[in-house]
Amino acid sequence: MDASGFVDAGWPVTDQLRVGDDWVSGYYLIRALLLSGPQAGSATTTYVVVRTRRSGAAMLVQVPANTWQAYNGWGGKSLYPFSSTDVRQATRVSFERPFQWNMPGGQGPLGWELPLVRFIERNGYDVSYQSDVFTALHPASLWRHRLVVVAGHDEYWTKPMRDGFDAARAFGVNLAFMGATTPIGRFAYRDAAARFWRTSRCPTPTRTRPARRPCSES
């Protein structure tokens, strides 16, 4: 852990999940079970968001993975004091660590997002899903849909995300925000890897310096 509170698991890759062409776009619950070693039999869960390549579905649901990570206190630090050691929050967090869903303030799809997904799927809407990380990389992907629904508590946005939503609205795309405090925290990705960004950076919100203050994008 460095002075910013940055925590990275640093674990080697032992397994990979391959998404088949026949997988339907949506949320997938993944349960990992240890088969050997001193902790054999232990298990944990996480979620994978499968998107459709160049989807033209009438509805797109954006999944708030950035906010999941902002509140994730695994390893002792999140962007919030209530889930950080010594009540001192980090200013950088990494995607390369597990989610500890049951900590104070923990975010995840079973709260605000699951009811929305159940409603959409039960009513048979033409829908596809993608994370806000993908939106930040490809903001023009919003333009291929008649309606973009922001699921749950989608608090943390990059500037390209906001610019993409503004452009989509101007283009005639309908927007629906199914939660509060969207988007009040602007942040930037740092340490970009070849295929994904792993570290988000955000200012420490206080009464005199609210979360709306932009992060450095250098």
Image: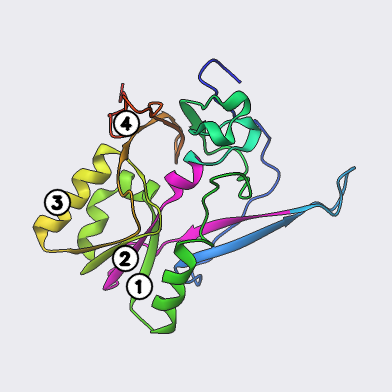
Q: Give amino acid for label 4.
A: Pro
Residue with the mark numbered 4 = 210
Report how far apart the C-alphas of labels 2 and 3 lie in the structure. Answer: 16 Å
Residue found at x 85% / y 54%: 41
Query: What is the span of residues highlighted in magenta in the rendered image?
Result: 44-69
x, y percentage for residue 209?
Answer: 32, 25
Q: Which of 1 and 50 is in front in this view?
A: 1
Q: Earlier in the sequence, mark 4 or mark 2?
A: 2
The C terminus, quarter of image: top left
Residue 100 left/right relative to 140: right
Q: Which of marks 2 and 3 is nearer the N terminus?
A: 2
Q: In this figure, which colouring scheme has been used for the structure?
A: rainbow
Residue 101, numbered label: none
Q: In which quarter of the image is residue 147?
A: bottom left
Cβ–Cβ under 8 Å for marks 1 and 2: yes
Report how far apart the C-alphas of labels 4 and 2 lie in the structure. Answer: 30 Å
Residue 34 left/right relative to 79: right
Residue with the mark numbered 3 = 167
Residue with the mark numbered 2 = 60
x, y percentage for residue 186?
Answer: 31, 36
Residue with the mark numbered 1 = 127
User: What secondary structure is marked by label 1?
Assistant: strand
Q: Give amino acid for label 2.
A: Leu
Residue found at x 87% / y 50%: 40
Seen in the picture, residue 173 relative to 164 is either above or below; the reply is: below
User: What secondary structure is marked by label 3?
Assistant: helix
In front of the other: label 4 or label 1?
4
Report how far apart the C-alphas of labels 4 and 3 lie in the structure. Answer: 26 Å
